[in-house]
Image (spheres, coloured by chain):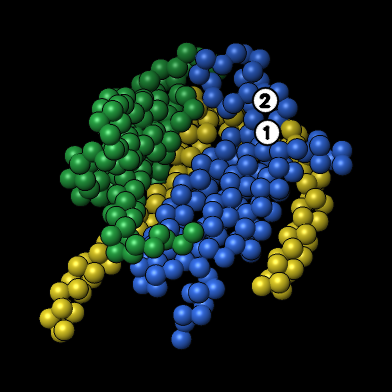
Amino acid sequence: MKLRTVLSAVAVLLLAAFLAEMAGLVPFGDPPSPAMDEWFLARAQEETGANNVVTSIVFDYRGFDTLGEACVLFTAVLGVALALRKRDRQSEIAPPADEEEA
Amino acid sequence: MTVLLENAPIAAAAAVFLLGVAMVLRERHLFRTLMGLSLVESAVNLLLVAIGYRHGGASPIYTLQTEEAAEKMVLPTVQALTLTSIVIGLATTAMLLAFAVTLHRTRGTLDIDELRSLRG
Amino acid sequence: MSKIVKTIAALLFPACLVFGAYVVLHGHLTPGGGFQGGAVMATAAALLLVAGIPLASKHEGRYHALEALGLGLFLFFAFVGLGAASGSFFFNALASHGFFGQAVAPGPNPGNLHTSGTIAWMNLAVGIEVLGGISVILYALREAARGEGDGKAEGDGK
C-alpha cells in the first residue's frame, strides 16, 4: 500500500517534469507549420461546397478516418449490448436450474 | 515559468493529464480508474485544440463570417481529429463501463485489491 | 420520478429532438455536425430514461436498427463517389446534384442549406448512427444498473 503510493508519486513527478519541458516546445497561439491547414482553409469551400471547414475535413478530406470512427462506434455499441445482454439471459436461465437441482 | 504562463492551455492539458494518470495509478476502485482514463482523454482533446489555436484567429467556418476574420482562422485539421478522438473516447468508455458492470456481476466487487485476492 | 419531472421531460423531449436535428442538418454551415447532433438527439432518449417514462423501453430494439441503418447510409454515400466519372471512394459526387447540390458562394456568406453534396447526407447518416448507438448504450447500462439493484443489496463499491 505504501509502496504503491510512493511509486505513483515518483511516476507522476517524472511525467510532470517531462511535460513541463515539453510545454515550451510548441508555442501556444502560433502553430509552427500550418501549411496544410492553410491549404484546406483556402480550398475547402470550392472543393467540397461546405462552409464549415471542420466538417469538410471530417467527411471529405479525411473520410476514411470517419469511416473507421463510425465502425469503432458501431463495434463498441455491439460490444456493450453483447456484454450486458448475455449476462441477463444467463442470470434469467441460471436461477431456475439451481432450484431444480436443489 | 513564463513559458508555462504563455502556454497556459497546454500546461492545463498537462495538469489534467497528470491528474488522470495519478487517478489511474492510485485509486483502488475500478470505477474511479475509469474516471481517470476519461480525464486523460479530455487532456488529449484539450491539447489537440490548443495546438491548433492562432492568436486572434476566428473559427474555421465561413457562414456569417466577416471578411477580415476569414483572413485568419484557427487550424481546422486538429479540430477534426479532436472530433474523432471524442467519439472514440466515448466508445471506449462505454466498453470499459460495460466490462466493469460484467465484472461486478461475476465477482461482486470493483475493488482491485479484492479482485486480485479473489483470483485463483 | 414524480409527475412534475415526467411532464417536464415529456415536454422537453420533442424540443431536444428538434434541436438535435437542427444541429445535424446545419452541420455543413454552423458548428456541429452528425456526431454532435446525434449526441443531442440521444440526450432526448436519456431524458425519457432518467425520468422513467416507460414508453422509452419499448423502442430499444429500434435503436439497434437505427444504428445499423446509419452506418449503412454512411457507407452508401461513401460509395456514391465511385459512380461519378473519374470519381473515387469518398468523392463528393453529389456536390452538384440532388437536394444538397447547389454551388456555394466563395468567401464569407450567409449560408445556403442546399450546398455541400455528400457532406450533408453523411452528416445525416452519422447523426442517425450516433442517435441509435448512444441510446443503445444508455439502455443497456440502465438495464444493467436495474439488474444490480435487486440482486445485491450492499451498494456497489463505494
User: Is residue C127 among what the camera can see?
Assistant: no
Residue that numbered label 2 is attached to: B57
Chain C colour in the picture: green
Chain of residue at mark 2: B
Secondary structure beneath label 1: loop
Q: Residue at x 77, y 55 (%)?
A: A16
Chain A colour in the picture: yellow
Secondary structure beneath label 2: loop
Quarter location, residue C79: top left
**Vertical side of B9 occupied by A50: above or below:** above
Q: Which amino acid does label 1 sit on?
A: Tyr
Q: Are marks 1 and 2 in contact (CB under 8 Å)?
A: yes
Q: Which residue is drawn at 75% across and 38% down?
A: B8
Labels 1, 2: one chain: yes
**Vertical side of B63 occupied by C74: above or below:** below
Which one is in front, C22 or C7?
Answer: C7
Which one is in front, C121 or A86?
Answer: A86
Q: Whole-Å distance between the Cαs marked 1 and 2?
A: 7 Å
Q: Residue at x 33, y 55 (%)?
A: C145
Q: Is residue C8 left or right of residue A3?
A: left
The blue-tinted chain is B
Q: Which amino acid does label 2 sit on?
A: Gly
User: Is residue A40 among what the camera can see?
Assistant: yes
Residue that numbered label 1 is attached to: B53
**Vertical side of B69 occupied by A8: above or below:** below
